[in-house]
Image (cartoon, rainbow, N blue to C red):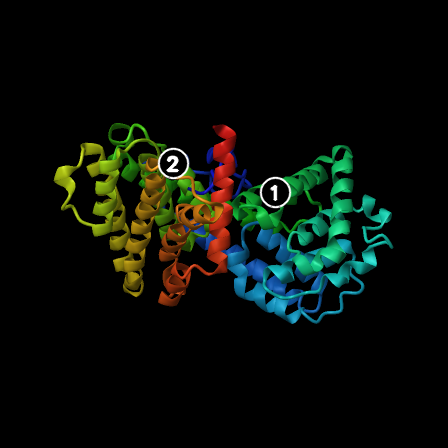
Amino acid sequence: MAAHIQSNSSPSQLLVSPEASLPPMQTTTDHDVNLSSEWLQIEELKEKVGIKFDLYANKPLQRVTLIASIQQLGLGYLFQEQIDQALKSMINVDVDEYGLHQMSLYFRLQRQHGHNVSSSIFKKFMGKDGALEEGFKSDVLGMVSFYEAAQLRVHADAEILDKALARCVTQLESTAADLNPRLKALVTNALKFPIHKNMPWLQARKYISTYQEDECHDKILLKLAKLHFNVLQKQHKQELSHLSKWWKDVDIVSNFPYARDRLVEGYFWALALFYEPHYSLGRKIFAMAIAYIAILDDTYDAYGTADELELITESINRFNTSLFEEMPPYARALCETTFGVYSIIEEDLLKDGNMAFSLPYVKEAMKLMAKSYHNEYLWLKKKQIPTMEEYMQLSFASSSITSLLILSYAGMGDIVTKEVFDWIFSEPTFVIASQKIGRFLDDIVSHEVS
């Protein structure tokens, strides 16, 4: 399994205190809340913010600042087309007069959107030693923005950015304690969770708090961000409520007392992939997958006997109930849970006729996990110590990355094609790199807690 993700924040703690005119947060999950009126308010505020793209058409600095704020507030998808057009139109803008803060925003945003901006634009801020000039020590906002921009560096940028980044980090760490609360929060959050490596939804929650303390903040944009956050939080809580009801029926305590209960953790993972409202099905599928994969993993790792695991693997490979009579109750319940998850996914995807083609890939992804776990178990049974090459070949597969990629894409709608699934199953470099990261991080965690 991929490395554990933990959060210290409960849903209620994430709530943003809205202005008096905004609707109060609903705390009950007994019934779904109708969010249509809030979405109408969001559309009205969205139109008001959208006008600013035209107002700043000939003001690139203001546009860069607006785009950066919109994205950090979790609103980027609402203005995707306008942001793309604005950044494309600015590719050849003269940035010689930009300060460190504005230059860093420009560099980061352009690279995030796939535009190959040269890191040489930062040379004017550096001394002969290649590090940031000492004068920037007092420019906290500029250094934070440069630190965030440097997270998108590639190997070719090392000569230009590495020394400057090292000096930047040292200066930020040494000055953080003496800053005002807003800047201190900005610095500590950036150093701990840079934008490029953070969950967008957690980033939005933190940034709302610091953004509203900025004297230059846009009141309409802030109001939109708060309302949007609270509305999506209601939707996320409703989704988790429905998942919890399904999970209660699975009855993990009775059927699988040996296994980890990871439903909420799985949903948190799903939010890391996609928090936007239109990916509700994707979150549902991914959270269910994480929850049941944990049971599967623990069964192969620490509970099932050789004969039982053979039956479980074969049953999932056949994807039918023909072997159920030979299984103990827990093994039968595990296979029923696997088939039940698939049936729910199948029902949801068949509602959208355009996504029916993904069902064979979903089924193969679920089979792949059982096969991978079983192969690892056979190593243990034979007391076989594999070479590093053999270990990587098999353990990368058991990281579940390939299967989870397939399952996450299955719920994303018609932006995903058959070619995407074929590409993932072909295990290109991107997938292998993801498997490697997931497997080694998980091994490190497992070693530390053992």
Q: Quadrant of residue 110?
A: bottom right
Earlier-in-chain disc, 1 versus 2: 1
Question: Residue 193: which numbered mark, if any?
Answer: 1
Report which quarter residue 418 is drawn in: bottom left
Residue 237 position (above or below residue 128): above
Residue 358 versus residue 303 in the image, above or below: below
Nearer to the camera, 195 or 3:
3
Residues under labels 1 and 2: Cα distance? 24 Å
Q: Residue at x 43, y 48 (%)?
A: 390
Viewer-proximal residue among 59 and 337: 337
Point out residue 102 in the picture as x, y percentages from the top left corner.
73, 57
Instruction: Give the amino acid type for the residue marked by disc 1 in the picture.
Output: Phe
Q: Is residue 321 left or right of residue 195?
A: left
Residue 106 appears in the figure:
no
- Residue 288, located in which quarter of the rendered image? top left
Is residue 68 toward the left or the right of residue 369 in the image? Answer: right
Label 2 sits on a secondary structure element that is loop
- Looking at the image, do the residues carrying marks 1 and 2 touch, with CB atoms under 8 Å apart? no
Of 47 and 387, the residue lying toward us: 387
**In the displayed structure image, the side of residue 132 where residue 303 appears, left or right:** left
Work out which quarter of the rendered image holds the N terminus and state it: top left
Q: Is residue 205 left or right of residue 353?
A: right
Q: Position of residue 163 (x, y in %)?
A: 77, 50
> Which amino acid type is marked by label 2?
Arg
Judge the density around disc 1: few (<14), some (14-19), many (≥20) Cα neighbours within 10 Å.
some
Q: Which residue is denoted by mark 2 in the rendering?
A: 262
**Residue nearest the viewer, comparing 413 with 197:** 197
Residue 334 location (% of width, % of height): 25, 39
Secondary structure found at label 1: loop
The percent position of residue 27, horizontal first and vertical second, equals: 41, 34
Q: Residues within 10 Å of mark 2 (few under 14, many from 20)?
A: some
Residue at (62, 69) in percent of width and height = 88
